[in-house]
Image (cartoon, rainbow, N blue to C red):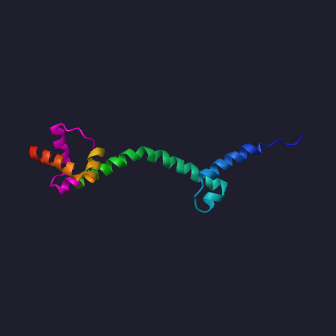
Amino acid sequence: MPRSRNLAASHERRKKIRKLAKGNYGSRRNLLRSMRDTVRRAGAFSFSHRRKRPGDFRRLWIMRINAACREHGLSYSKFMHGLKELEINIDRKILAEMAVLDPASFKAIVDKVNATM
Protein backbone atom coordinates (compact mmCIF):
# COMPACT_ATOMS: atom_id res chain seq x y z
CA MET A 1 0.00 0.00 0.00
CA PRO A 2 1.45 3.40 -0.92
CA ARG A 3 2.32 5.90 1.76
CA SER A 4 -0.33 8.52 2.37
CA ARG A 5 0.74 12.13 2.66
CA ASN A 6 -1.42 15.05 3.69
CA LEU A 7 -0.08 17.52 1.13
CA ALA A 8 -3.14 19.76 1.18
CA ALA A 9 -2.76 20.56 4.89
CA SER A 10 0.99 21.14 4.55
CA HIS A 11 0.44 23.42 1.60
CA GLU A 12 -2.19 25.45 3.52
CA ARG A 13 0.14 25.85 6.52
CA ARG A 14 2.95 27.11 4.32
CA LYS A 15 0.59 29.35 2.41
CA LYS A 16 -0.54 30.96 5.67
CA ILE A 17 3.06 31.65 6.70
CA ARG A 18 3.89 33.00 3.23
CA LYS A 19 0.99 35.41 3.45
CA LEU A 20 2.23 36.72 6.81
CA ALA A 21 5.81 37.03 5.50
CA LYS A 22 4.73 39.05 2.48
CA GLY A 23 6.78 42.23 2.09
CA ASN A 24 9.89 40.90 3.83
CA TYR A 25 13.29 41.24 2.19
CA GLY A 26 15.32 38.47 0.58
CA SER A 27 15.28 34.98 2.07
CA ARG A 28 12.88 36.09 4.79
CA ARG A 29 10.27 36.11 2.05
CA ASN A 30 11.40 33.05 0.10
CA LEU A 31 12.72 30.35 2.44
CA LEU A 32 10.30 28.55 4.72
CA ARG A 33 12.53 28.39 7.81
CA SER A 34 13.43 32.09 7.57
CA MET A 35 9.78 32.92 6.99
CA ARG A 36 8.71 31.03 10.10
CA ASP A 37 11.33 32.72 12.27
CA THR A 38 10.49 36.16 10.93
CA VAL A 39 6.74 35.71 11.29
CA ARG A 40 7.07 34.35 14.83
CA ARG A 41 9.30 37.23 15.86
CA ALA A 42 7.03 39.81 14.22
CA GLY A 43 4.08 38.35 16.12
CA ALA A 44 5.96 38.64 19.41
CA PHE A 45 6.86 42.28 18.71
CA SER A 46 3.31 43.00 17.66
CA PHE A 47 1.96 41.58 20.93
CA SER A 48 4.37 43.46 23.17
CA HIS A 49 4.03 46.75 21.30
CA ARG A 50 0.25 46.66 21.60
CA ARG A 51 0.83 46.83 25.36
CA LYS A 52 3.31 49.70 24.95
CA ARG A 53 1.09 51.86 22.72
CA PRO A 54 -1.04 53.46 25.50
CA GLY A 55 2.10 54.60 27.32
CA ASP A 56 3.55 56.01 24.11
CA PHE A 57 0.42 58.06 23.54
CA ARG A 58 0.38 59.30 27.13
CA ARG A 59 3.99 60.52 26.74
CA LEU A 60 3.06 62.28 23.50
CA TRP A 61 0.10 64.04 25.14
CA ILE A 62 2.26 65.16 28.06
CA MET A 63 4.89 66.59 25.68
CA ARG A 64 2.24 68.53 23.77
CA ILE A 65 0.62 69.90 26.93
CA ASN A 66 4.02 70.86 28.35
CA ALA A 67 4.99 72.71 25.16
CA ALA A 68 1.69 74.60 25.10
CA CYS A 69 1.93 75.47 28.81
CA ARG A 70 5.46 76.81 28.46
CA GLU A 71 4.28 79.15 25.70
CA HIS A 72 2.10 80.74 28.40
CA GLY A 73 4.85 80.77 31.04
CA LEU A 74 3.79 77.75 33.08
CA SER A 75 5.35 74.33 33.57
CA TYR A 76 3.45 71.11 32.99
CA SER A 77 3.59 69.99 36.61
CA LYS A 78 2.31 73.32 37.96
CA PHE A 79 -0.43 73.34 35.33
CA MET A 80 -1.61 69.85 36.26
CA HIS A 81 -1.45 70.69 39.97
CA GLY A 82 -3.56 73.79 39.33
CA LEU A 83 -6.13 71.73 37.42
CA LYS A 84 -6.39 69.35 40.38
CA GLU A 85 -6.78 72.28 42.80
CA LEU A 86 -9.56 73.78 40.68
CA GLU A 87 -11.15 70.33 40.27
CA ILE A 88 -11.09 70.62 36.48
CA ASN A 89 -11.29 67.00 35.34
CA ILE A 90 -10.07 67.00 31.74
CA ASP A 91 -7.87 64.12 30.70
CA ARG A 92 -4.51 64.52 29.00
CA LYS A 93 -5.77 63.38 25.61
CA ILE A 94 -8.37 66.15 25.45
CA LEU A 95 -5.94 68.75 26.82
CA ALA A 96 -3.39 67.83 24.14
CA GLU A 97 -6.03 68.08 21.40
CA MET A 98 -7.11 71.47 22.76
CA ALA A 99 -3.50 72.67 22.81
CA VAL A 100 -3.06 71.76 19.15
CA LEU A 101 -6.49 72.41 17.62
CA ASP A 102 -8.02 75.09 19.86
CA PRO A 103 -5.29 77.22 21.44
CA ALA A 104 -7.74 79.92 22.57
CA SER A 105 -9.68 77.60 24.88
CA PHE A 106 -6.42 76.08 26.14
CA LYS A 107 -5.15 79.57 26.94
CA ALA A 108 -8.37 80.24 28.88
CA ILE A 109 -7.73 77.17 31.03
CA VAL A 110 -4.08 78.17 31.56
CA ASP A 111 -5.18 81.68 32.58
CA LYS A 112 -7.65 80.22 35.06
CA VAL A 113 -4.90 78.05 36.55
CA ASN A 114 -2.49 81.02 36.65
CA ALA A 115 -5.08 83.13 38.48
CA THR A 116 -5.21 80.66 41.39
CA MET A 117 -1.43 80.50 41.81
- Quarter of the picture holding the N terminus: top right
Query: What residue is drawn where x is 63% and y is 61%?
Result: 27
Count of numbered marks = 0
Task: Left or right? Give the position of 47 relative to 27.
Answer: left
Task: Left or right? Give the position of 59 relative to 81.
Answer: right
Task: Left or right? Give the position of 96 relative to 111.
Answer: right
Q: Of helix, strand and loop, which mostly describes the magenta segment?
A: helix
- Quarter of the picture holding the C terminus: top left
Q: Position of residue 53 (x, y in %)?
A: 40, 47
- Work out whether residue 78 can be spotted: no
Query: What residue is drawn where x is 10% and y is 43%?
Result: 116
Q: Position of residue 115 (x, y in %)?
A: 9, 46
Q: Position of residue 4 (x, y in %)?
A: 82, 41
Span of residues in magenta: 68-92
Residue most extreme to the right: 1
**Residue placed most toward the observer, 28 or 71:** 71
- Work out whether residue 75 can be spotted: yes
The quarter of the displayed image where residue 72 is located: bottom left
Query: What residue is drawn where x is 15% and y is 55%?
Result: 73
Q: Is residue 69 magenta?
A: yes
Residue most extreme to the top: 87
Q: Is residue 89 above or below residue 34?
A: above
Q: Is residue 85 magenta?
A: yes
